[in-house]
Image: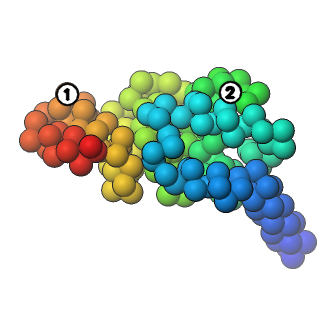
C-alpha cells in the first residue's frame, strides 16, 4: 500500500511540474483576467497551445491536478485546436474537472454543452446549476447565460425580473 501511495504522489508531483512548465505565471495571469478572453476562448487556447514547449498530452496530465490546465485541455477538445480532435464528450470531462477546481470558465463552458446537448445529454437544469456556480464565482458570462435561462424558462420557470438582475450582474 505504501508503494502505491508513493506512486500516486510521484504522479501528482510530475503533473504539477508539467503544469508549472506549461502554464507560466504570465499565462496564469491571463487566465484570471477576463479582459484577455473573448466570449469564445478558442484564440487564447490556440495561442497557449501553439508554443513550442506545450504538448497536449502534457497539458492533459497536468489537468489531473490543476483547474486551469483542465480548462485549457477542455477548450482544446471543445474547439479542436492544439492538435486535439474536436470531441465535446472529452471537453465536458475536462470542463467538469475545471469547474470542480473553481475555474469558473469551465462551469460556463460545461453549462453551454449541457444546454446544447453536445457531448452530454441536454439538461437545462444541470446547465442552470453550472451557470449559478460560475456566476457565484464571478464569471460574468455565467450570469448572463443564467439570465437567459430564466428569461426563456429553460431549467426553471419564466422569471423576467430575475433575468434582468442577472443580465445587470453580467454586464
Q: How is the image coloured?
A: rainbow
Of residues 145 and 50, which is closer to you in this image?
A: 50
| In-image side of 148 versus 48 (left or right) | left
Q: Earlier in the sequence, mark 2 or mark 1?
A: 2
| In-image side of 146 versus 28 (left or right) | left
Secondary structure category for the residue under label 1: helix
Q: In the rendered view, would you say 61 is above or below 15?
A: above
Q: Residue at x 51, y 43 (%)?
A: 36
| In-image side of 148 versus 53 (left or right) | left
Residue 67 % position (x, y)? 60, 54
Residue 1 % position (x, y)? 85, 73
Q: Which residue is drawn at 9% across and 41% down?
A: 161
Give the residue at mark 1: 152
Residue 45 at least partly seen: yes
Of residues 145 and 170, which is closer to you in this image?
A: 170
Res 122 → quadrant:
top left
Q: Residue at x 76, y 27 (%)?
A: 83
Give the residue at mark 2: 81
Q: Distance between the residues labelled 2 and 1?
A: 32 Å
Q: Residue 21 carries which label?
A: none
Answer few, some or many: residues within 10 Å of disc 1's Cα (few below 14, many 20 plus, some between 14 and 19).
Answer: some
Q: Residue furthest right?
A: 3
Of residues 28 and 2, which is closer to you in this image?
A: 28
Q: Which residue is drawn at 71% across and 56% down?
A: 24
Amino acid at each position: 500500500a505504501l508503494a502505491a501511495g508513493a506512486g500516486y504522489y510521484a504522479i501528482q508531483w510530475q503533473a504539477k511540474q508539467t503544469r508549472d512548465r506549461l502554464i507560466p505565471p504570465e499565462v496564469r495571469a491571463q487566465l484570471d483576467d477576463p479582459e484577455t478572453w473573448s466570449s469564445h476562448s478558442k484564440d487564447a487556447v490556440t495561442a497557449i497551445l501553439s508554443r513550442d514547449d506545450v504538448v497536449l498530452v502534457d497539458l492533459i496530465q497536468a489537468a489531473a491536478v490543476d483547474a486551469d490546465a483542465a480548462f485549457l485541455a477542455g477548450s482544446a477538445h471543445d474547439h479542436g485546436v492544439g492538435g486535439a480532435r474536436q470531441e465535446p464528450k472529452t471537453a465536458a470531462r475536462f470542463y467538469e474537472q475545471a469547474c470542480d477546481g473553481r475555474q469558473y470558465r469551465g462551469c460556463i463552458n460545461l453549462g453551454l454543452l449541457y444546454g446544447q446537448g453536445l457531448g452530454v445529454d441536454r439538461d437545462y437544469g444541470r446547465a442552470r446549476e453550472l451557470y449559478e456556480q460560475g456566476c457565484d464565482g464571478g464569471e460574468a458570462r455565467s450570469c448572463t447565460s443564467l439570465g437567459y435561462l430564466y428569461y426563456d424558462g429553460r431549467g426553471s420557470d419564466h422569471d423576467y425580473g430575475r433575468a434582468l438582475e442577472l443580465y445587470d450582474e453580467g454586464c
